[in-house]
Image (cartoon, helix red, strand yellow):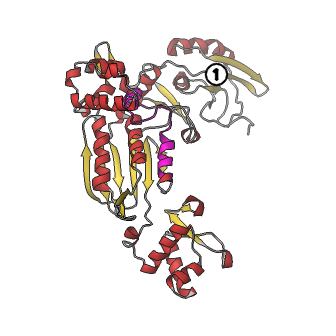
Amino acid sequence: MSDNVAENQIIEYKSIWKDEYLAWICGYANAKGGILYIGKEDDGSVCGLSNAKKLLEDLPNKIVAMLGIIADVNLHETSDGDYIEIVVKPFSVPVNYKGEYHYRSGSTKQALKGTALNEFLMKRLGVGWDSVTIPNVSVSDLRKEVIDFFRTKGLKSKRLDKSVADSSDEIILENLELIEDGNLKRAALMLFHPKPERFATGAYIKIGYFGRGEEVLYQDEIHGPLFEQVEGTMNLLFTKYTKALISYPGLTRIETPEYPEDGVREAILNAVCHKRYIDGTPIQIRIYDDRIVIWNTGRLPDDWTFETLFSEHASKPGNPGIANAFFRSGYVEAWGQGIAKIFRECEEAGLPQPTIEFLGSDVKTVFRKDIYNEEYLKTLSISNRQIKAMLFTKEHGKITNSNYQELCDVSKRTASRDIKELINMNLLISNGKSGAGAYYMIAHNGVIIGPDAL
């Protein structure tokens, strides 16, 4: 065996040269670059080439002729035999081999086709999906009342100059850079056209209420310009799909939403601004008894990690034209603060931290509500004393066996049995100790919420 680095995303070993390997070089050039070794086995050991010096002369010319790029081709002479090293740098322009565009992803080479190819070419040519112009659509085809809505919001947020707001619809769109050479960009059609789905399949939002068996109990679809979709979705979520907890401090009636409205709105705006509309899939919002799940197609920018997303970062919207219009209207910030706002709103509402996952080409955002209120607990198969104990734990951050006995006027044995049932139902969780140091805390679907978090 060799001490060479194993094959990975940027290293590939081939025992002999075949012209079809030009496709691998193409894949490296279109991705992050890489090194192709000719004359090595899969484990990196040298097997040698009988024609290494000839390849040293031929390969640079083949690469230029077939791919239109220059790569470093080096000859290495060893006691085990000669081998060739081809060093490929990433190229900012798209590179093709016989009319096909290849891309190195992980340890494999892919021939880009369909949506993936369109997206790749637009990115390499510096053209965003929402910045492409669409012919034969005029400003008069847009919904004027939505443009007027934008005017009002922009003036109120002080992000739209009054002289621009008082001008024509066309001037407003030009100010937003949504017109080029007299043609409207896709962003303008998504934001203001009455039927954006004519220009992007799946450009709408679906909401469904799901039972415990994943059965859809009822559902809605929100169509129209993106501004109307956001407003319509928020209205449905907080009037039809979720409840408000009612309290009466003194003589005043106070309604507290189950979820923080500003945090949920920010998540919906994120989905709208970052969605990969080219996939043709609507944004989907699933409502359950204890959570809201928002799905949209999208992915992190190429040079980002999860650490980038959850730390201070610059704003890199998937659809800059759409995001800019929402920013100018006062809906969103332009400094990459959306994620921080979502987390802050949930924290201030005393709710569990939301989760954000990237699953293939999908983004999944989950809000969990405070299910530890008397109304919800009564729907569970627990006793009145267990409900009382849960509310005590929520208020004080923890409960001991002694607390339970005193609160519910029961024996230690009964308290232990009741607490064990609550643990089995994933409503309480132990601190892991026994005896005098044992206590129990609220558990939100396995996420521990201790005294410091309540």
Instruction: Classify residue 156 by image quadrant.
Output: top left
> Which quadrant would the N terminus be assigned to in this image?
top right
Picture layout, residue 233 above or below residue 406? above
Q: Is residue 211 left or right of residue 120?
A: left
Identity of the residue furthest to the left in this view: 140
Q: How many marks?
A: 1
Q: Is residue 300 left or right of residue 287?
A: right
Residue 184 image position (x, y, % from top left): 29, 20
Residue 144 image position (x, y, % from top left): 22, 28
- Type of residue at label 1? Val
Q: Secondary structure at mark 1?
A: strand
Taking the spot 51% from the left edge, 86% from the top edge, the residue there is: 409
Residue 30 image position (x, y, % from top left): 52, 24
Taking the spot 32% from the left edge, 46% from the top edge, the residue there is: 234
Q: Is residue 428 left or right of residue 238?
A: right
Question: Dominant secondary structure of the magenta stretch?
Answer: helix
Between 395 and 283, the one nearer to me in the picture: 395
Picture layout, residue 261 above or below residue 329? below
Residue denoted by label 1: 87
